[in-house]
Amino acid sequence: MRRLQHPFTDPDDPDSPRSAPAGNVPAELNRFVGRETELAALGGLLEESRLVTVVGVAGVGKTRCAGRVAALTEKRYCDGVWLAELSPVREPGLLDHAVVEALGLTDHTGRPPRTVLVENLRERRALLVLDGFEHLVDACADLVRELLRRAPGLRVLAAGRRPLLVDGEVTFTLAPLRDEDAVELFSERARSVRPDREPTAGDRAATLELCHRLDGIPLALELAAGRLRALSVDQVLLRLDDRFRLLTGGSRGAPPRHRALRTAIGWSHELCTPEQRLLWARLSVFAGQFDLEAAEYICGGAGLPADAVLDVLEELLAQSVVEREDGATGTRYRLLESVREYGAEWLAAAGDTRRVRRRHRDWFLGLATWCELDWFSPRQAEVAARIDADLPNLRRAMECSMESPDEVHLAHHLAGSLWFYWAGCGRLSEGRYWLEHVLEEPTPYDASRLKVLWVLGYVAVLQGDAVGAISALQECREEAERSGDATAMAYAVHRTGCLAIVTDDPARAEELLREALGRYREIGELNSNVVMAQVELAMAVAFQGGLDAAADICEEVRELCEDHGERWALAYALYVLAYAALRRGLPERARRMLGECLSIGRTFDDLLATALSLELLALVTAVEGDAGEAAVLQGAAERIWPSVGLPLFGSVYFGRPRVECEEQVRRELGDAAYEAGLRAGKRLDRATAVERALGGGGARERRDTPGAEGGPSSGGTRRPAASRMTGRSGPERW
């Protein structure tokens, strides 16, 4: 998702420069050809109607045309143009989650994703592009109907093979390319295949005839152009003419243009070597993108050794059967949906679908397991990006495991292994969907089911659902005791302690967390969960007055995180240390630590860390003497809290910095100026608020209080590793 990178400007200042529109529409990888009339017509329809659906046969260019229109009209929508690719989504229940993901929204609460969408779009002027929805048409129509009804500034541009049939919908049927545009497209793609080739005098007539044969369907033309590496235009035309008669002979009832596309795909398929056909078919099990390593494992085997997959994949790339996409996680590939469907038919005809789907499931089960282990390492950000990229495939792997009673435990294992993604990367809502979904099916494998239960309890705690958390964690504890599962018991006790913190019972939280840490030591467990248990213990101790002891615990945590490259849990330790620094009269140290908290929260899309850091930074800013900026930061945090849950958990202890800040700022500014600052902060989107906070919010001179006693600093000496978690002392109150 593209985020605003511009310095903050006052929303109330009419002379402030406007930020560039946000959005996620990808850049075009090759030149868009033709369609001037259609683009102008679609742009006009979007001005007049709030729902425009581009329909047409497969391969006619609906996706490309919708993306082009979105890019051309981007400046109309101050809140962005957002593309949701729905073809990889198979479960109707995941539709809302997929759109939330596409919009770059993060929500930690237990609210349904539909509610999140409505609340975020209600007062925004944005364009939502829905692509490839035809297999989810009923669910998609229901979603669009509600969004348009409740978000008056929203417009929707949909692209699929059939209309949504929603009131107010305007349907635009995208026709094949006109002759001139078809010839230009074929010639353009031919030049990319053979840049050194000079067209002959006869090529123009042959190209025009070829475009007629393929009915001007862009995908068919691009597939045909891919053949020019080995053939002349005349040879392509001759062979295509033969295959056209052969491949359409048994399908006279099909629309001619559909037959033309099937002909082009089928002809490309016939011209493939046996190894290319085999890889094409096996690649059809992927949802969305995939990388080379996954393709080698899943598609290698009988008839196609794994070490030959790269060479064959390159040949399919050359023939436009596979597309390459370069992004944050490196080079990845995908099949266009029509091409994927064709390959899936051949895989099914070979009777090999179930076997390849299981290999697909096994690979992504292994990926999730590896990523869970690698989360406690310097590669946390890489792990988060990898899971983001492969989420459609992970969903499909869980779906595959749910299809057989004998394999349900693998779905449990997969959903539980992704705890770090659900809890640490802003995916609580979808995580809860899968955790509850897999629990609907029984399994004799206690360990995998118990893990799902404690992860579900953890997710419910973070969503502010105490009832759901208690239910899952109590069941986990009872079953763990019955089965003698010491690991599940430790996690259940830990997360019950976490629940006690956010429900203002720090004494009970301390008791449970010390018990959990003892259990972790007994079983030799050390990972991000264990580190978070230490941070949560520090919070519980601090809430009871032991601020010095809490700081000692968090110094140990910081050393442990530095040793292992852990960043996610480190943010919360820094939050506690920042509070300690502020109380010791060292606001600049507190600011540096909170700046790191904000940076980490942005890396992992962790709303809780971001909101807590902004709240405490507001108090730091007030202490430093900038009451106006403190009010703005409080407003920015206030805008984030609804996506986290109950503001500051409704906790007296977590809420104390906010209360102190508000009291001080109201005294200095007065009620009217304070409320104005809050309103200005609430208008800041999260990315802009974080940038503003990291930039200091203005030119202020800040220095540590002279003569203050030394305390933890960002560059302080490490403490010995001996545990201080048993100590409780310190006169300061949280």
Image (cartoon, helix red, strand yellow):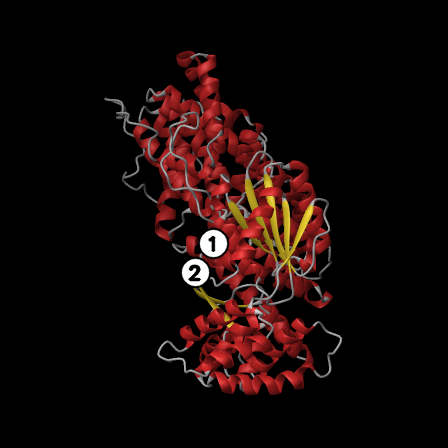
Badge nearest the viewer, 1 or 2: 2
Question: Is 282 drawn above or below residue 618 in the view shown?
Answer: below
Q: Nearer the viewer, residue 151 or 417?
A: 151
**Which numbered disc, 1 or 2, marks the residue that appears first in the sequence?**
2
Whole-angstrom CA distance, mark 1 to mark 2, is 10 Å
CB under 8 Å between discs 1 and 2: no
Query: Residue at coordinates 56% horizontally, 66% vertically from top-left?
Result: 177
Residue 218, position as x, y percentages in the image: 55, 69
Q: Secondary structure at mark 2?
A: loop
Can you see residue 714?
yes
Residue wearing tag 2? 329
Occupied quadrant, residue 725: top left
Q: Nearer the viewer, residue 526 or 295?
A: 295
Can you see residue 482?
no
Q: Residues within 10 Å of mark 2 (few under 14, many from 20)?
A: some
Question: Is 488 drawn above or below residue 677 in the view shown?
Answer: below
Q: Secondary structure at mark 1?
A: helix
Q: Nearer the viewer, residue 661 or 375?
A: 661
Residue wearing tag 1? 384
Residue 268, position as x, y percentages in the image: 56, 80
| Left or right, residue 187 beside residue 710 | right
Q: Amino acid at mark 2?
A: Thr
Residue 181, position as x, y percentages in the image: 51, 67
Occupied quadrant, residue 11: top left
